[in-house]
Image (cartoon, rainbow, N blue to C red):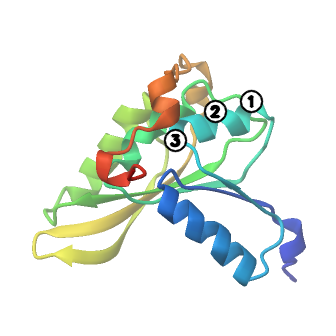
Amino acid sequence: STFNTTDIFVHANDLNPSSFKYLKINCKNNKCQNLKTYNMDGRAFVQHLQDQNVDFDHAIMNLPASAPEFLDAFRGFKGKKLPEIHVHCFSGKDDDAKEKAIARCEEALGCGIDNPSVHVVRNVAPNKNMLCVSFTVPESARSLAKIGISPEEEQSSEPPSKKSRT
């Protein structure tokens, strides 16, 4: 089968002003089309896409280490189709590290996750791995109470090191 990249539209978000600047520069330098960039809080971004009736197939939630905590933005999900989530996090190297990562995602999402897949992305320290937990947003997430986004969260829920320096 053939793969046509013109059928894909990407919504890319980064709260960090410096990262957002380079996202736009890289987009221009690489002549990216079908790409819309945002400089928003992660939770506000997910809710913005839903409010704009943007259906999406995948959400890639990369680091910071707190990425799983942003899964609460999918509570009360109202999109037509349930997207596949790929969330990155750090974990120890103990035997139950993958189970702990799944539990962390379930706690933030507020419901169980069916058939998650977890893989090691890379070894980051002697006792730490970066993991990626992938799963489809569960149907049960639709019935959960949608979280409220405060004005402060819309501005930033990143640590001060990620905020614009003045």
Disc with the residue nearer the chain's start (1 vs 3)? 3
Residue 55 vs residue 49, the one in the foreground = 49
Q: Residue 47 bears which disc, if any?
A: 2
Q: Say few, some or many: other residues with alpha carbon within 10 Å of mark 3 (under 14 / 14 to 19 / 20 or more).
A: many
Residue at left offset 10%, top offset 76%: 126
Q: Considering only order in the chain, which callout, 3 or 2, is on the residue closer to the N terminus?
A: 3
Neighbor class of circle 1 (other Cα within 10 Å; few <14, some 14-19, many 20+) is few
| Left or right relative to 116: residue 98 | left
**Viewport quadrant of the N terminus:** bottom right
Residue type (three-letter) at the residue carrying disc 3? Asp
Of badges 2 and 3, the one in the foreground is: 3
Where residue 147 sits: x, y (%)? 51, 21
Gap between marks 1 and 3, in whole Å?
15 Å
Separation of marks 1 and 2 at Cα, in angstroms? 6 Å
Q: Tell me which corner region of the image, top left, top right, bottom left or bottom right, holds residue 81.
A: top right
In this figure, which residue is indicated by the disc labeled 1?
51
- SS class, disc 3: loop
Q: Few, some or many C-alpha atoms within 10 Å of disc 2 (few <14, some 14-19, many ≥20)?
A: many
Between 152 and 128, the one lying in front of the other is 152
Q: Which residue is mark 3?
A: 41
**109 left or right of 98?**
right
Quarter location, residue 78: top right
Rendered image: mark on residue 149: none
Indicate left or right for 28 with 120 as reference. Answer: right
Labels 1 and 2 touching (C-beta < 8 A): yes
Q: For the residue marked with disc 1, what is the amino acid?
A: Asp
| Closer to the camera in the image, 157 or 1 | 157
Name the residue rendered at 53%, 36% in the picture.
43
The kind of residue on which mark 2 rests is Gln
